[in-house]
Image (cartoon, coloured by chain):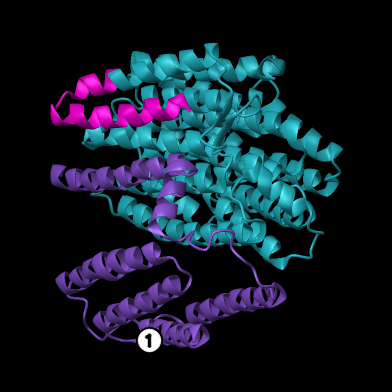
Amino acid sequence: MIEIAFFSLSILAVIFAILVITAKNPVHSVLFLVMTFFSIAGHFVLLNAQFIAVVHVIVYAGAIMVLFLFVIMLMNLNKESEPAKPLWLKLSGVITSGLLLLVLTAVFRKTVDKTAHVLPNPDIGLVKNLGMTLFNDFLLPFELSAVLFLTAMVGAVFIGKVKAGN
Amino acid sequence: MNYIYIFTGLGVVSLFLGLLEKEKLIKYLTGFVLLISLGIIFTLDEKGSYFNQMLLADDLVNPMLKVLLFLGLCHFILFYNTGEEFKLPTAEYTALFCFILVGAIVVTLEFNLVMLFLGIEIISIGLYIIAAGNIQDEKSREASLKYFLMGSFSTGIFLLGITFIYGVTGSFLLSDIKTVSSGIPEGSSPLLLLGTLLILSGLAFKASAVPFHFWTPDVYQGSPTHVTAFMATLVKASVLFAFIRLFNQAFLVTSQTWQNSLWLIIALTVTLGNVTALYQTSFKRMLAYSSIAHAGYMLMGVLVPEDPSYKSILFYALSYSLASLTLFGIYFLLEKKGKADALESFRGLAKQNPELAVLAAISLSSMIGLPPAAGFFAKLNIFTQAFINGYTLLVAIALITSLIGAFYYLRVIGLMFKMDNSVEKIHVGLPFRLIVWVQVILLIVFGIFPALIQ
């Protein structure tokens, strides 16, 4: 049962991901990305990490994708035309990413782990446990990410002010 | 650790003071806090690990913190009234400056991959933004966007490396990674190898080592000069400190793999950096390529075992940063006089401004590695250590390329002392003059008494 769910979710995720980069229309592309995020959220549920699954849907599929759609619509990018790129650029892109794919596949083939692992605590992904870890072991990174977001926010104000000043 | 609190707080306070439009107060406060924390760090040697070994301050990294804070202070005073010239919002600029300093401190003290990632992100995001400080200039916009796109891509690669390492070792802690990976025979875990190489590439991008250096010349040239000076000195030094901590504390066991890759990266970096710098006509581009080359020399320190490598990288980073800050400062004065970003702008500087020309010449000779200045001992330390540890060919390459490098530095010195065409008299403010003199005197003092820094 779980295997059926896993494989159907995986196939869906891969298909939607391919559609994201092949779709000519940016709006379609964004919508396919939303679908990809949903299938990945399904994977998180299968791993008993409900909190991450929900956050993934709310933040990525919800907030970020809505922003994407707004930007595309406001900038009027939903044209089907795209400037043609030179052939050598496409070729070098194909070669380098192909090499990366080759290395990654080889590495994962060699590291397939057939032994069954039992987690010491199967509920590790639930909100309570996650919160305990986050506010005990990872308190400092959690607080410092606030500095990171503050930097980004101040940055937006900075660029806005620099623009307004001129 | 306390410095993280201090500078985060300072950033937030300066934002609030910006609300009250107390711009002068922000500047004095920042300078004062930098000075005080520098005083504290030299009197109190704070040691220990914090928050479940997220950060670790010990005898090896404490001197690096001192260097970072000192460079921060020098940079702040040298460019303290840049804001008005570029019409930058003072409060926001100071806040970003403080946050980047926090990132640099985190990166230097990191003992956990999560902290390393966070620190690097804080630094990078801050830099993407202040690189666009001169936004009406197309080059500045281009620099910011280019840095942002390439930087976020490299962060992705870096993050992938961290996940692979976590997958193999089950921990983010550097000491745990070392313990677990030492139980794995070399080459038998491809995932560990790949993770190490991806982390190496991610960090090499931030340190602008050669296969990942393409952003450097454009970003250094396009950004406002004070931002370039910041990137080339404080930020570069902190990334190299992170490099050495990570690779000495975590990956010693998988050494052969990353050492070979790092060997190749260094050989390419010193060669390409120095050779390309020869052909530059823009001063900032030349310094960008020279900073690529110097990153290569500093990376040579990562190859050798723990104790000497910390000291030699520290010495090199300090001497390079002092010289670099002085040069950027003097170039900044020329830029304010409306001079173009070209080597020719330095022609005849010595006629009306002998003081500036002499200071610049000493800094340039430190960069070449001529004996009276600190650059000589910095290079000597690094090369000797690498030679003792059996990297003969690499040392040979480094020596030849630093000879090549001497040409383009000497060309600037030659141009400055040509008397045919003079740069008009430049007014130098007191704080600027003080800091530049302090930097150059330190260069000479460390060059004559290198033992001071041990």
User: What chain is the purple one?
Assistant: A
Residue B420 placement, left or right of B88: right
Residue B114 placement, left or right of B265: left
**Quarter of the picture holding the C terminus of chain B:** top right
- Rendered position, B382 above or below B159: above
Indicate the position of residue B25 as horizontal and vertical percent values.
Answer: 22, 19
Q: Between residue B418 and residue A141, name the one nearer to us.
A: A141
Asked if the magenta segment contains residue B15, the reply would be: yes
Indicate the position of residue B296 as horizontal and vertical percent values.
Answer: 65, 45
Q: Which residue is mark 1?
A: A19
Identity, as a three-letter code, of the amino acid under mark 1 = Leu
- Rendered position, B229 above or below A72: above
Query: Does any portion of residue B53 appear in the rendered image?
Result: yes
Q: Between residue B95 and residue B436, name the one nearer to us.
A: B95
Chain B drawing hue: cyan
> Label 1's element?
helix
Q: Main secondary structure of the magenta part?
A: helix
- Rendered position, A6 above or below A151: below
Query: Does any portion of residue B223 appear in the rendered image?
Result: no
Tell me which chain the residue with mark 1 is part of. Answer: A
Number of numbered discs visible in the structure rendering: 1
Furthest toward the top, the residue is B43
Tell me the magenta residue range: B1-28
Q: Which quarter of the picture shows residue B127?
A: top left
Q: Residue at x 63, y 47 (%)?
A: B274
Indicate the position of residue A19 as horizontal and vertical percent values.
Answer: 38, 86
